[in-house]
Image: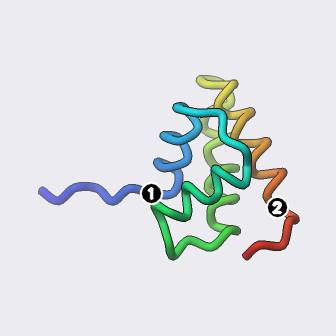
């Protein structure tokens, strides 16, 4: 059976659980793992994670929410 591809959400969860990265550093790390991902896709994935994690892992959800909000309007596409 083939391995399941790693999604942007998987990468965000992995990175957010290991280090408290600044939003710009988190975006760079995600883009390194997913070079074709647009910034908007990364932000959407972060908001999806926030919704999924709000009850189970509130600290991670807050970190990803802060990332998504901070990254929305800085113009880097």
| Residue designated by label 1 | 7
Please count the marks in the image.
2
Q: Looking at the image, which residue is at 70% across and 50% down?
A: 47
Q: Quadrant of residue 44?
A: bottom right
Q: Secondary structure at mark 2?
A: loop
Rounded to the nearest angstrom, the CA distance separating label 2 from label 1 is 20 Å
| Rendering colour mode | rainbow
Q: Position of residue 64 (x, y in %)?
A: 69, 42
Q: Looking at the image, which residue is at 51% across and 57% down?
A: 8
Q: Secondary structure at mark 1?
A: loop
Image quarter of the N terminus: bottom left
Q: Is residue 12 above or below residue 61?
A: below
Q: Position of residue 10 (x, y in %)?
A: 47, 48
Q: Residues within 10 Å of mark 2 (few under 14, many from 20)?
A: some
Q: Is residue 22 above or below residue 29?
A: above
Q: Looking at the image, which residue is at 63% across and 61% down?
A: 42
Q: Which mark is residue 72?
A: 2
Is residue 45 left or right of 22 when viewed as pictured? left
Q: Position of residue 50 (x, y in %)?
A: 68, 40
Q: Is residue 63 above or below residue 35?
A: above
């Amino acid at each position: 059976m083939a391995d399941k591809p790693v999604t942007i959400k998987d990468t965000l969860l992995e990175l957010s659980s290991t280090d408290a990265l600044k939003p710009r550093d988190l975006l760079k790390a995600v883009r390194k793992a997913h070079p074709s991902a647009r910034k908007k896709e990364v932000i959407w994935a972060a908001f999806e994670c926030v919704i999924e994690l709000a009850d189970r892992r509130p600290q991670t959800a807050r970190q990803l929410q802060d990332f998504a909000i901070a990254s929305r309007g800085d113009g880097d596409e």
